[in-house]
Image (cartoon, grey):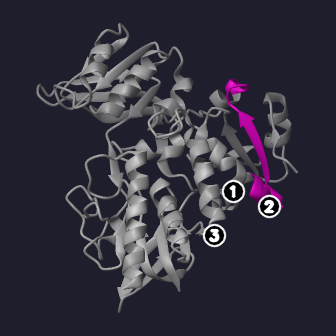
Amino acid sequence: MYDVIVVGAGPAGMTAAIYARRASKTVLLLEAVSYGGQIINTPDIENYPVEAHISGFDFSQKLYEQTKALGAEFKFEKVVEIKDENGVKTVITNKGSYEGKAVIIATGSENRKLGVEGEDALRGRGISYCATCDGNFYRNKVVAVVGGGNTALEDALYLADLAEKVYLIHRRDSFRGEETTVSRLKERQNVEFIYNSTVTKLIAEKRLKAIEVTDKISGSVREIELNGLFVAVGRVPENQNFANLVELDEAGYIVAGEDCRTKCAGIFVAGDNRTKTLRQLVTATADGAMAATEAVKYINL
Amino acid sequence: MAIKELNKQQFEEEVLKSDVPVLVDFNAAWCEPCRMMKPILDEIEGENPKFKIVSVNIDEEDELADDYDVTSIPCLVVFKGGEEVNRSVGLISKDEILALAEG
């Protein structure tokens, strides 16, 4: 039996492991893919205290080494369910099951999909969820960005420097993202705004070659030939497997305050999958510290 | 044995004409998830798998990336008898890589 089982080895999960280890608790970290979480996609982190610039890769690597050196155990297995019986938590993965006194859920979030037929098959064949990762494939080509938040706006701006033409498709008539980014985009000659519209069809021949865009107000349909489509319509928390134990809000986030305690005693949540207003690296690590401290308190009761 | 990086000519010989299945890792130096995947691939390589692992740098071999419609990396493509049989985009776990290559 472990003292603390942490689900997800991103910045929140690994920080939780550090705090729990420093409180002399045994820790198992279960991670479905690879340590690091979504921060590994960030080429340059500029807003984390102390380091003015660090890549997401280096950040993850250092955090992993620190966590490992403190004696946390890592297993790369996907958690499918958590059970709570008489206070003992059983975490079931695709390979086995583990018992713990407390569990910290730090599974983060994943990219929201467009939900248009053929999207999965075309991922990596014209469809991308990361402009800074895949922008280089579209030098002097035609691309579209879908979305209206900061990520969509920043993606469009980034791509405007590389691509011949960028369409920005948004389902509303105004943007949720920052005003300054919107005005910088409007100055670009090669950016065309398409408002009140959604992508309703993907047209492909081995790779994506065109999209069908429907204007929600007029109902008119337009076909746009392009090489790449960047989807930036937000993220969804990965909490579905825990709905039996904890409370989820309408958007799927685990309901918990700053103390990271869920409605189930001994189960805590840390990071982007918790209900909160600011989802940043620094708030993820803060959650990790808080969740571990609360978990230790719970165990020592 | 380290994972060999291939150019277009070597690709023909080492991948398309290979007797054993080949897992091709399309990557680039600036791709952070590719850097995360590298040690996982090295680990698999060290366990003498029944397939060959090779690497293609898409900045140096953009024609190869284009030939195989690779537009996101990391991208793993499995070849058997000169034909693509499986593919995955994005960082995946060791188990998923093994399932992809052996599946």
Name the residue carrying label 3: A71
Residue A126, position as x, y percentages in the image: 49, 32
Inspect the image, locate mark 3, and give the three-letter code of the amino acid beneath it.
Answer: Gly
Q: Compare residues A23 and A71 and report the one nearer the observer.
A: A23
Q: Are marks 1 and 3 on the same chain?
A: no
Name the residue carrying label 2: B49
Secondary structure of residue under mark 2: loop
* In the depicted structure, whether residue A150 falls above or below residue A67: above
- Residue A226 sits in which quadrant? top left
Asked if labels 2 and 1 touch by Cβ distance under 8 angstroms, the answer is yes
Secondary structure of residue under mark 1: helix
Q: CA distance from mark 2 to mark 3?
A: 30 Å
Please give the chain letter of the residue carrying mark 2: B
- Residue B66 painted magenta: no
Which residue does the image show at 25% across and 62% down from the upper left? A257
The magenta stretch is B42-63
Density class for disc 2 (Cα within 10 Å; few <14, some 14-19, many ≥20) is: few
Q: CA distance from mark 1 to mark 2?
A: 10 Å
- Residue B58 painted magenta: yes
Inspect the image, locate mark 1, and give the three-letter code of the amino acid beneath it.
Answer: Ala
In the picture as drawn, the residue positioned furthest to the right comes out as B1
Name the residue carrying label 1: B101
Give the label, 2 or 3, closer to the camera. 3
Give the label, 1 or 3, closer to the camera. 3
